[in-house]
Amino acid sequence: METPIGPLMLDALPHPVLLVDPRGHITQANNAAQDFFQASVAVMRRHPIAHFVPFGSPLLALIEQVRTRGAAVNEYRVDVGTPRTGERVVDIFATPLQDQSEEVVVMLQERGMAEKMDRQLTHRGAARSVTGLAAMLAHEIKNPLSGIRGAAQLLETSVDDADRALTRLICDEADRIVKLVDRMEVFSDERPIERSPVNIHSVLEHVKRLAQSGFARNIRIVEEYDPSLPFVFANRDQLIQVFLNLVKNAAEAIGDDPDGEILLTTAFRPGIRLSVPGTPNRVTLPLEFVVRDNGPGVPADMMPHLFDPFVTTKTNGTGLGLALVAKIIGDHGGVIECESQPRRTAFRVLMPAWPGTGDPPERE
């Protein structure tokens, strides 16, 4: 006979909660647990908990420890991911259901969202550092470069053909540096963002058309959209810039792989809230947009610095694309995060919804 522990109350919790009996079988699971393990409670009851976690998972030893000690035990940063669920790092909180009981209540708290919040603040700090650097470069580098280029052009008229190639090289390199500085000047734009209700599916469709007519013409792009999604409160042009950059990165990661595929998804994720630095306000970020590819993945040593400026794996890259993406999303009050493993790299963007009610006056 199952011990009642308030199913309605458990279903209201955003974290996965399981009840494990003395045989190691799951007897109860709230909605969050069913979503986490991608299995219904009926399926979960037919298998021991070991069926849903990696072989030799610390979670199994933790449950036995709780039974032995008769007291609560916690463990942090445990990987309970499987090929079906992907990489999932959680904090585990396990406790006996009641005195003299061998049934154990297990709650999992996914580390991803807490770390997203911490890293988003780091991304914003990196963007601010680039802002100051861009302003300095514009003033301190572009003016001397203009003089260098002018001097090279004057020399070009009075040298022989062999030396003229060198003066041409000086001019070309000066132009290349100016273009790099121009790209960085985007970071120093501190004007308020002009935002309005935007249909994200219209944005993604536009990005898809651009990609398939150019850099991703040989790559399959799949869409999984929630048609009932509310409008996002954002700048349409900047969103196009963000997702065009993410799709282009995905296409470059896939390369010439004939089985290359980019997946674009949208979903509503209630319950995600972000504290706004310097104010007591908390912003709700219920809109989730994901760009996922089946390329080789991001090197593990690059993951912590992926959104930092000048970090890139491309031979001719500048490392400013993802830094700019992080700045744009941060300026909108949103969060961007990357989860990567071979054949499954996902850039996840969380954004605020349009605060109005109903449809905007002019639909796109």
Image (cartoon, rainbow, N blue to C red):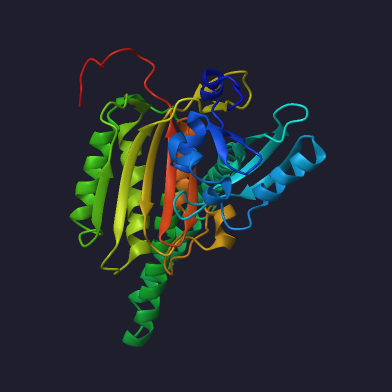
Q: Quadrant of the C terminus?
A: top left
Question: In the rendered image of this protein, does residue 224 appear above or below residue 137?
Answer: above
Say which residue appears at 29% left-offset and 62% top-offset. 260
Drawn side of residue 100 relative to residue 115, left or right = right
User: Percent position (x, y) of residue 30?
Assistant: 52, 29
Say which residue appears at 43% left-offset and 55% top-offset. 345
Drawn side of residue 116 relative to residue 95, left or right = left
Q: Quadrant of the N terminus?
A: top right
Residue that protrudes farthest toward the top in the picture: 357
Q: How many marks?
A: 0
Say which residue appears at 46% left-offset and 28% top-offset. 285
- Can residue 321 be seen at all in this image of the molecule? no
User: Percent position (x, y) of residue 299?
Assistant: 52, 63
Question: In the rendered image of this protein, does residue 24 appear above or below residue 7?
Answer: below
- Can residue 133 be seen at all in this image of the molecule? yes
User: Percent position (x, y) of residue 184?
Assistant: 46, 49
Say which residue appears at 39% left-offset and 74% top-offset. 169
Drawn side of residue 77 relative to residue 292, left or right = right
Quadrant position of residue 200: top left
User: Percent position (x, y) of residue 276?
Assistant: 58, 25
Residue that protrudes farthest toward the front in the picture: 1
